[in-house]
Image (tube, rainbow, N blue to C red):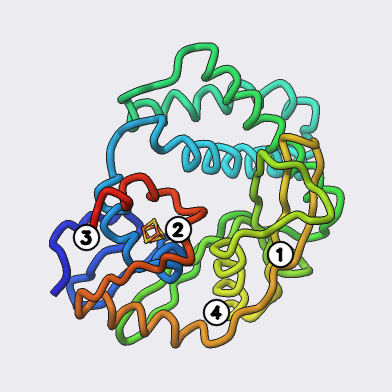
Amino acid sequence: MYLDYIKQDDLGFTKLPDGRYFFRTSVLTALLQCPYKLHFIAKNNTNDFQKHIALIKGKAVHATTSFLIEMYKAGLIKDAVKLADKFIANYLAETIKVYNKNVPNKQQLQLLQNNIKIAAFNFAKYTFKNFKSYITEKTFIIDRDSFVLKLTPDLITEIGIIDYKTTSKPITTRFYIPYDYALQMAIYSYYLAVDAQLLYYSFASNQLLLTKPGSFKNIEERILRLVEILETNRLYKNTYACATCFYRSMCMLQK
Ligand code: SF4
């Protein structure tokens, strides 16, 4: 049986009392890409703000976008502009209570807050203008004999699922969708039986791009194979995925 440290729920995966694996989609896609990441996902569970900055920023953008969409729906656009700063400042203050180590200085926090605001306003305006119906951050549980999967797409509209992503790269004709994002969309699409697309906001070019990633076959078979790998503790390294891996520096130290 694999490691005891996977008991913590907030890692995004755990072993349930009935023996099944529980996955959040983001962790599932990381492990499907390279099962060896399991070592680092668990060990990276610290309260270091800077280490989790991408995650913190992503969550804050999503929360602020949902807040703005609700304000728009209620016809409170002017209030939304006034309240957004306060909402984000409160959100970050709460986050700092959890990630209280290595917290950015005041100036860095202000920059982070501005970036969250710009991205969230772009996402909320696009959503409000282009879709008639929108449900934000609804959770679905997929229950199988050997695993349980938690799906929380950012947005469900009349054209299907939309997930918000930000990028520091400019949006050009050669814009590339990372493998794990494409796989995440394929998982949503497979289990919820709707189209799934990504809405990108680029900080570099101040542009939005709605794009449909390529498809993947055998989604459930891939997950069942991963469960078997975890069960038998055969965490192989997928070196094809190293170039873009978040854990690369830690992994390179291990033989
Ligand atoms: S650096 Fe490569 S082998 Fe190591 S965890 Fe990342 S993807 Fe896997």
Report the residue marked by disc 2: 242
Among all residues in the image, which is located at the extreme top? 106
First-in-chain label (2 vs 3): 3
Could you give the CA–CA distance between mark 1 and mark 4, rounded to whole angstroms?
A: 15 Å
In this view, 175 is above or below 141: above
Task: Please indicate whether residue 90 sits to the left or right of residue 64 in the image.
Answer: left
Location of residue 201 in the rendering, given as x and y in whole percent from the top left corner = 73, 44
Could you give the CA–CA distance between mark 2 and mark 3, rounded to whole angstroms?
A: 23 Å
Location of residue 109 in the rendering, given as x and y in whole percent from the top left corner = 52, 19
Q: Nearer the viewer, residue 189 or 50?
A: 50
Report the residue marked by disc 3: 6
Location of residue 77 in the rendering, given as x and y in whole percent from the top left corner = 79, 32
Disc 3 element: helix
Could you give the CA–CA distance between mark 4 and mark 3, rounded to whole angstroms?
A: 25 Å
Which amino acid does the dot numbered 1 rest on?
A: Gln
Location of residue 226 in the rendering, given as x and y in whole percent from the top left corner = 35, 78
How dense is the environment of label 3, judged by Cα within 10 Å: few (below 14), some, or many (20 and up)?
A: many
Res. 191 mark: 4
Disc 2 element: helix
Task: Please indicate whether residue 47 sits to the left or right of residue 192 in the image.
Answer: left
